[in-house]
Amino acid sequence: MATLRYLPLPNKHVTPYIRPDKRESKAMTIVTGFRCANGIVLGADRQMSVPGAHKYHEKKIRVELGDGWNILFGFSGLPSVAREAQEKIMAELRTQDGPSIENLKKAADTVLTSMSLGRQYGDVQIELLIGWAAIFEKPELLKFDGKGLHTADDFTVLGVGESSLIRFLADNLYQPRLNTDFGKMVAVYLIHKASQYVDHCGGPIDVVTLTDCDENYEELPESEIKELLEGFKENEERLVEVLIHPLASPT
């Protein structure tokens, strides 16, 4: 008589493997950077939010102060990876023959290329704006979009702040010929409106500038940001008229 053989049934508790969507793990934000007639301005909110996780606040603009030069790092994405990139770029820059915009480009390209190759699917999970300023030199702004490093456009936005709202406001408020004093006001207003109307943006606002003068780094005090926001509330209707007027003008 033949012996019956019983095959084991599949374990019903085993869940099929699904490759995680790394886009869901990225912390969301808004960071804006733009050129002015006498320097560059970076602005950012502080809210960090990961879908399915809690929210918290962290600065997204970091500065490296040197002797006659300064570097700004604004990031969107994972804070730990952004810090890793910043530390490695500065370490690589110290191996060069003195700080300069060209050496900064080389250091950033070397580090970010290495980080991209060292991660699965080439996903670094950050975007960066890197600002450079030195005495008697024209400030420069670089952008890393997660895939390549290049000179940033005159006006650039990282994160979920890349929205039609921010683009509309920027088109009507920003011009490269603005000086950094007015540029700081524009940055505060853009981040403020993103915090009001764009998901995953919020918290305190940070605005910093780089210029080509002796004191080429400035961080806008919290008291001045608060004063600007109060002024915006008082004059919102007048500002809306300025923004909407071009749309109502006859062609």
Image (spheres, rainbow, N blue to C red):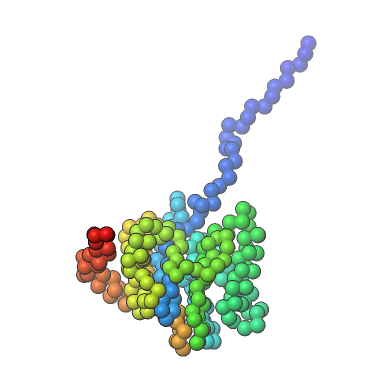
Residue drawn at 32 percent across, 60 percent down:
196
Left or right, 192 with reference to 39: left
Quarter of image, res 159: bottom left
Does residue 215 sit above or below 55 in this rendering? below
Considering depth in this image, is 17 or 62 the residue closer to the camera? 62
The residue positioned farthest toward the bottom in the image shown: 214
Q: Where is residue 41 drawn, in percent x and y?
A: 42, 74
Viewport quadrant of the N terminus: top right
Nearer-the-camera pick, 122 or 178: 178
Outermost residue toward the top in this view: 1
> Which of these two is toward me, 95 or 226?
95
The answer to whether residue 197 is left or right of residue 47 is: left
Seen at 57% across and 37% down, the residue is 15
Residue at the spot 63% in from the left edge and 64% down from the top edge: 113
Residue 191 placement: quadrant: bottom left
Image quadrant in which the C terminus is located = bottom left
Disc tally is 0
In the figure, is residue 15 to the left or right of 227? right
Viewer can see residue 83:
no
Q: Nearer the viewer, residue 134 or 76?
A: 134
Q: Residue furthest front?
A: 251
Q: Tell me which residue sits at (37%, 79%) in the image.
A: 179
Q: Quadrant of residue 36?
A: bottom left
Residue 45 can be seen, yes or no: yes
**Residue 110 locus on image (x, y percent):** 64, 69
Vertical comparison of 121 with 113: above or below: above
Question: Horizontal and vertical percent for residue 21?
Answer: 53, 48
Residue extending farthest to the right is 1
Q: Position of residue 13 (x, y in %)?
A: 57, 35
